[in-house]
Image (spheres, coloured by chain):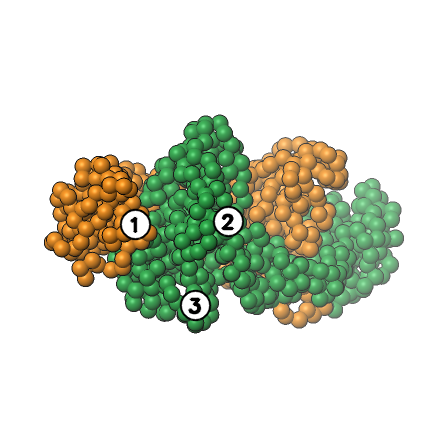
Chain colours: A green, B orange
Amino acid sequence: MSDAAAAAPGADRLWSVDEHLADILRTVRPLEPIELQLLDAQGCVLVEDVTVPAALPPFDNSSMDGYAVRAADVRDASEKFPTVLTVVGDVAAGGDGALVAVGPGQAARIMTGAPLPPGAEAVVPVEWTDGGLGGGPATTMSAGGIAGGASGEGAGLGAVRVHRPVTAGAHVRARGSDVAAGDLALAAGTVLGPAQLGLLAAIGRATVTVRPRPRVVVLSTGSELVPPGGELAPGRIHDSNSYLLAACARDAGALAYRVGAVEDDAATLRATLEDQIVRADAIVTSGGVSVGAYDVVKAALTGLSGDEGRVEFRRLAMQPGKPQGFGRLGPGRTPLFALPGNPVSAYVSFELFVRPAVRAMMGLEPPERPVIRAECTEPVGPSPRGRRQYLRGRYADGRVTSVGGAGSHLVGALARADALIVVPEDVTSVPAGAEVDVILLD
Amino acid sequence: MSDAAAAAPGADRLWSVDEHLADILRTVRPLEPIELQLLDAQGCVLVEDVTVPAALPPFDNSSMDGYAVRAADVRDASEKFPTVLTVVGDVAAGGDGALVAVGPGQAARIMTGAPLPPGAEAVVPVEWTDGGLGGGPATTMSAGGIAGGASGEGAGLGAVRVHRPVTAGAHVRARGSDVAAGDLALAAGTVLGPAQLGLLAAIGRATVTVRPRPRVVVLSTGSELVPPGGELAPGRIHDSNSYLLAACARDAGALAYRVGAVEDDAATLRATLEDQIVRADAIVTSGGVSVGAYDVVKAALTGLSGDEGRVEFRRLAMQPGKPQGFGRLGPGRTPLFALPGNPVSAYVSFELFVRPAVRAMMGLEPPERPVIRAECTEPVGPSPRGRRQYLRGRYADGRVTSVGGAGSHLVGALARADALIVVPEDVTSVPAGAEVDVILLD
């Protein structure tokens, strides 16, 4: 803490960025796990160790289209002196389960994934045979069942010439060779991406217990706000924060519910929050948190008691984003983030404080974005002493350039940024060529 | 091309990975743009240059809570000798627009974002005044309107002591200082993230014209497939590919529609495709593309003509993923990807061929995932000569380790991988410590 005021106790002291974030991460809790259908759990964190209930594959099966044989029968097979075997049947994946047995001198036509029939020890790929057609090496099998069925039995199905030997187990996927019953398939804490969901499906799991995505209600405050698309009367501006922050919330992994702009009236705001809180795991407001006479969020949420919850309004040693409110609202103690109203302040505040909270609620580690080092292409500053400054920048190949300067209303520049440049509390300017901490925004 | 066969013409030749991908990217087209609500366009590519219709901010406004003043009046203000100004009114953001004028010796209380009243040139932050309370420096403003209204006028509203001078323009955001009318707000080709959506809202745009997310229909084929959660009869396995590939499609940016598994019957498959194609921008099947007698996708989609479209089945010089089908189906020429049925083959095929197609349909550049170099912690191989091998691996800090080996049925290992190790066509083994190409999966 570089500012003397920051160490002072009481409501009026300056909080550091790290203190405020630590308070938030101490307060928010991972959401209660729920059981979801596999595809609804994509991107979520598993809370149970999932063990394999039964071997995968569940039976020895062919990894090729070809002929199931006894290894000894084809030991001497060659291109010049092919071994001729009697084809006794046809085994397709998903056939009726009545498997032909393969005896000495016999073979069964077998398809990829089909169970290895009794007696057979290996599969000869169709390309190593004449395909039962009596000619040279086959490139494909004739379509459909040999004897008009998916699985036939008996003599008279013809013969196949085998051109190469196979050893026992060749082109066979052994039962349990992927995962065995009782194996740990996925450990608690795993993030479920496509491959993990594929594994869960493969071992027969239709549902899975995960931490759900938080439902984040986003609202703007300000009597001057008009929805985009509407006409602007004098003194009015368009509401951009509710769109910006709803998009940020989704980007962080949440399900966002955008409530429009609420006018600067404490009763209206309170009624809106009461309506919305039932569907919220967290609430994000913007505007109305500073020292002005119409700072409605501060007015409506200061001095709550009992089941109303408790929200604190603080000054942070940072720029932008000095005024911040944080607390828990209502009997369910729903986390509430009251961000400043300037769009750039709101954006930076979301990235620094709400995004980590959303990730912590999902059980994702680490909650914060990674910080990298980069060289400044140009001088950066001035930056206020005693405040940590977050400037918008563009990053490429280890170097970063500030865009738009320090103005917290510059949404044009924000839209060109892909990084935040961090200027520490005790630094007031950064020369060109110096290294700085950079947070990459994706 | 390292394999002589790969250069041979005709349907039976081996295609290289690069040839197959080039054919796909030549064939698929970016989707027709549509107009979407802002939040529905998140993650999509803008197809229009968006210009700023009117200056932002639309009027000079205060960046602080404080007092709007004439600069000359407070030129000599100091802590010791404060300047006393008559407060003539109150200006809140979103007030009724009837602005009090600030004359010599006068000030108007003003809130962040409120329009600068006529006559005023600068804003003195409330912390640099006594807040009109006649005491020391203020930390906040008294709530609500001074004279019971959001915007008052006239004498008798009290006085404020100003402790510091301000220059003209101080704490004022000038009209157009963010973006000016006619400026290019966002160029065609911009990917719309939170900041870009915030800017669009700020300049009043409620909708935006973008390339939509492709709707990708995913289905598995195989009579042996049982949905996860169901009992497995002998010879049956669970359908995992439809989950795996639907999740991959969403990961790539698409809207995925998972159709379950279709049995190995050409008429059923054709009927399912006919039903599904109306909602598909692309179709992904898995299984039934090899040389077997029951390879239903190949059977159902080979030899189409006229309005039926055209699908080609190829052998690729790769492992896993040798058999691949690709073409366009139906009168709308919907791209269809017929992937092999082994889960690992299907996954690798999706990553290499379908994901780039999805991104190309969205207009995202580049379509392919980046390739990095990494050092092998252990020997890798054997890898078949003449085929490009994609092994599953785990990557950390510039080093990669193979997991699970070459088996294309190993979904257990796939679920532990976060990278694909690329072994080139002319390499059959890679010693420990050697560098390889690696594709990071996120």
Amino acid under label 1? Gly
Could you tell me residue B64's position as x and y percent? 29, 47
Amino acid under label 3? Gly
Residues indicated by labels 1 and 3 sit on the same polypeptide chain:
no
The residue pinned by badge 1 equals B136
Q: Residue at x 27, y 49 (%)?
A: B130
Circle 1 chain: B
The residue pinned by badge 3 equals A309
Left of A167 or right of it: where is B372? left
Could you tell me residue B201's position as x and y percent? 31, 50
Residues indicated by labels 2 and 1 sit on the same polypeptide chain:
no
> From mark 1 to mark 3, how far is it between C-alphas?
33 Å
Is residue B32 visible from the viewing direction of this image?
no
Left of A269 or right of it: where is A75? right
Could you tell me residue A322's position as x and y percent? 39, 48
Could you tell me residue B431's position as x and y percent? 75, 35
Say what secondary structure mark 3 lies in.
strand
Is residue A128 visible from the viewing direction of this image?
yes
Left of A63 or right of it: where is A211? left
Amino acid under label 2? Asp
> From mark 2 to mark 1, how far is it between C-alphas?
31 Å
Instruction: Name the foreground residue: B341 vs A348.
Output: A348
In the rendered image, the vertical position of residue B425 relative to residue B85, given as above or below: above
Circle 3 chain: A
The residue pinned by badge 2 equals A18
Q: Of the residues tagged 2 and 1, which is closer to the observer?
A: 1
Instruction: Name the foreground residue: A14 vs A435.
Output: A14
Q: Neighbour class for label 2 at 10 Å: few (<14), some, many (≥20)?
A: some
Q: Neighbour class for label 1 at 10 Å: few (<14), some, many (≥20)?
A: some
